[in-house]
Amino acid sequence: MARKKARESYIESELIYAYARTGRLADLEEFISGPNHADIQKIGDRCFEDKMFNAAKLLYNNVSNFARLAITLVHLKEFQGAVDSARKANSTRTWKEVCFACVDAGEFRLAQMCGLHIVVHADELEDLINYYQDRGHFDELISLLEAALGLERAHMGMFTELAILYSKYKPAKMREHLELFWSRVNIPKVLRAAEHAHLWSELVFLYDKYEEYDNAALTMMQHPTEAWREGHFKDIITKVANMELYYKAIQFYLDFKPLLLNDLLLVLAPRMDHTRAVAFFTKAGHLQLVKAYLRSVQSLNNKAVNEALNSLLIDEEDYQGLRTSIDAFDNFDTIALAQQLEKHELTEFRRIAAYLYKGNNRWKQSVELCKKDALYADAMEYASESRQPEVAEELLDWFLERNNFECFSACLYQCYDLLKPDVVIELAWRHNIMDFAMPFLIQVRL
């Protein structure tokens, strides 16, 4: 009646509210579809606050307020319609409200559709993840983020949070995810998650990509069963900044993989202190185990390496190898080695001792050793090389004392330029062996 006399806005608005209040939705819909001056938006809000959602739905739809319409449809449990309205509203806040409502209602397919519009906003991602996690919907949350990775607006936070979720709930999938997207995750954040979840293999992978080689090597050594891989470890250990890790790695291989130790040492050799390494293995009693390494670095002519390898060759009674070693690499204590060898039970090693004394110009000691072992040819050779007449004369006397006239004659030939003719004639005459001395005397130029 009032409307017929005055078409005021407030009158028509109150009429709409009355229709809503009395449940005459058909009359309400008919009224708002025609010309009117009512404040439909305001009445829609009143209806919403009074929980008259069906009326609010008609009113919001009439004024195309899709954001409020979406929320109204949520209250009416019309989730598909709510998603469609949210799409028209295209508001992040609306998407969140509809999404959370779908999660609470167990409509995860629709929730995912909404979530895809939320996760692309980095500042909204945490709220979404917490909402799912607080309600225990871990698999659905992971599915949502997996679907979102292919979006054009995918950002680092999505890849990072998915990696963290994998570390908590699906550790078997984390490695594959990291291998594909390691460059797109926040590595420090994922590192903490992997460490907290005790995913040592993944932790090493991330340390490697983050160029934290020292931590990667330490993690491998601390958790070898899960994290250690031979090729990967050798690649990482060469890049570490702290050289002390070299020696930790050596101890680790001694304890864990001793048969692969030489392979590791060959990789470490370019930067390693070989003197310290030899001292380490000597103290541990494992020099024999690293013989291949010692041979590979002997070309550096390091004193400690030479002495260690020579010691091994003596223990193995490899006199030929020892002779080759001391001829090729001279940086070792020759006198100490000679003194050690002159007491050796094998003749060939005592022979090497004589050879070493000769190299240090200790001619008398060298010749004396040869005499003891009846190494006549060596004795004559060393006497000749000494360039000392008294050494040669002593050797002649020694041969004569033993009636070894053939060696006497050979020594005259070997030491020809060191011996005086009168001395030779006197010795030959006294022992009645002029025939043995005659080849020497014939060549003497008086």
Image: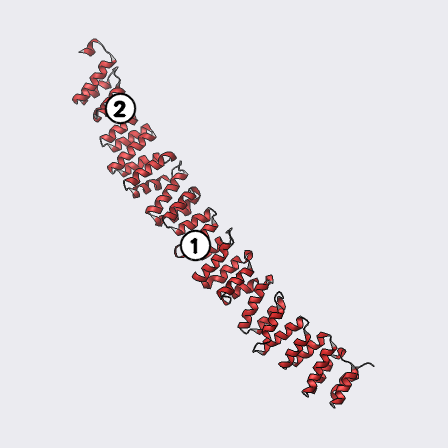
Q: Earlier in the sequence, mark 1 or mark 2?
A: 2
- Residue plotted at (66% across, 76% down): 365
Q: Is residue 26 above or below residue 350?
A: above
Q: Is residue 330 above or below residue 43?
A: below
Q: Residue at x 24, y 20 (%)?
A: 43
Which residue is the site of mark 2?
60
Q: Amino acid at mark 2?
A: Tyr
- Residue of label 1: 220
- Pointer 1 with pointer 2, Cβ within 8 A: no
Q: How many neighbours does mark 1 have within 10 angstroms: few (below 14), some (14-19), or many (20 or more)?
A: many
Look at discs 1 and 2 and give the one toward the viewer: 1
Residue 228 shows in this picture: no
Q: Nearer the viewer, residue 308 or 128?
A: 308
**Location of the N terminus (image quadrant):** top left
Question: Residue 249 location, x and y as percent?
Answer: 47, 57
The answer, for residue 157, to whether it is visible in the render is: yes
- Residue 407, position as x, y percentages in the image: 69, 84
Secondary structure of residue under mark 1: helix
Q: Amino acid at mark 1?
A: Met
